[in-house]
Amino acid sequence: MSMNSTPKGERIHIALFGRRNAGKSSLINAITGQDLAIVSEIKGTTTDPVYKAMEILPLGPVMLVDTPGLDDEGTLGAERIRKAKSVLNKTDIALIVTDGAQAADNLSFENTILELTEKKKIPAILVLNKQDEWQEQEDKIATFGDICVSAKSGYHIHELKELIARKIPTEEQTGKIVGDLLSPGDFVVLVVPIDSAAPKGRLILPQQQVIRDVLESGAVAVVCRDTELTDTLNRLGQTPRLVITDSQAFEYVSKHTPEEIPLTSFSILFSRYKGDLAEQIHGVKALKNLKDGDTLLMAEGCTHHRQCEDIGTVKLPRWIREYTKKELIFETSSGGTFPENLEKYAMIVHCGGCTLSQREMSFRIAEAKDQHVPIVNYGTLIAGLKGVLKRSIEPFDEISSIYTD
């Protein structure tokens, strides 16, 4: 996968926080070696979080996020600060940038963000910028932060990138989509329906990412349509290690996959990979508690053109109403927006989150859990609605052992 095609949700999100004129935008330009961010002597030039996908050695594909100054003023300033702090929910590592000359006098703004990063368990680096202006005092000033740099002269920029690389979670810490279930040489059958809802000429992102993970594990991916599943299994010549299906074909695929072959879905794999599968299994049970007049939030991590049989706004609401026999209200959110106050919702039904970072998806689930609102993703809910949830989580020993109907 080339750097330009690396999905946003799979990039390392590096966000820069600090006061106005601390040199955040200049530091982004120094890290990337390009003039990506607008630089000005006027305080508050950056008014909204700015996202830029890049490839930076030795870090690989990253998403750099430049945020507004934390000492902004007035009503508009408060809104900018709120947006800056919300960026933390999707941040893998935070760079708190300050003018080193000010560090000895007051780090109140910086300490506020450091406290938040500690609370959210986000790695953070306190960067003392503008070393070119106070290099004669560097020995003294260096004690107040993690590293002294100069965006202007390039001083310690390479060392900063190496420090970021050391603090970023490794693959062993973040896990795999499906690779940990496979051994080299295993066959995996991926069931991909081609219908009116399928994108023309390409596979959707979760399917692409699962195929890549299968191949990186040394296993073999065999892709077929749902209507060709039986013939594919008969012709394969050996029992596949796993069958993975699009959730919308769950019921059909379950009927046509022998019981001895483990079965799950792309969406459930992403629930396990990016969120909290156990919590979302509990969320399925909330269906039985819904009452007439309850409001459900249908949340998606991306924005896309909705078709006549859109899964989030048409199919799932219809299936939920048919299952519960209740008169329910459905609201939607998409893209980077996710309500702060979730108390009005009886339940949240979320997409698989393939375009969201692991941290942001986990944050959304944690927010729902903290506000006592059940949350479940599309695939896990569909498995419950179609009566195949128990079977679909059997491949995951750590989850199936705690599952009860």
Image (cartoon, rainbow, N blue to C red):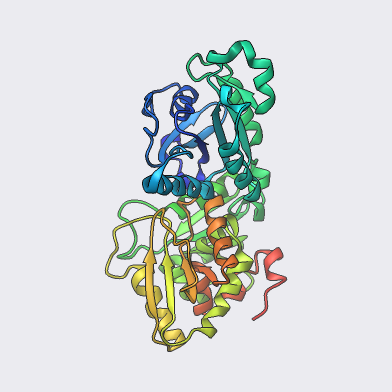
Q: Quadrant of residue 20?
A: top left
Of 72 and 259, nearer the camera is 72
- Image point (43%, 80%), residue name: 320
- Image point (60%, 54%), residue name: 178
- Image point (51%, 45%), residue name: 10
Q: Is residue 393 above or below residue 46?
A: below
Residue 392: where, in percent of width, then height? 58, 70
How many numbered discs, if any? 0
Q: Quadrant of residue 319?
A: bottom left
Q: Is residue 172 left or right of residue 242?
A: right
Q: Is residue 244 above or below residue 314?
A: above
Of 61 and 84, nearer the camera is 84
Of 260 and 87, nearer the camera is 87
Q: Quadrant of residue 295?
A: bottom left
List the single residue furthest toward the top: 136
Residue 94: where, in percent of width, then height? 57, 38
Residue 218 visible in image: no
Residue 365 visible in image: yes
Please identify the quadrant where the C terminus is shown: bottom right
Residue 91: where, in percent of width, then height? 54, 44
List the single residue furthest toward the left: 308
Of 352 and 66, nearer the camera is 66
Q: Is residue 202 left or right of residue 18?
A: left
Q: Is residue 194 left or right of residue 209?
A: left
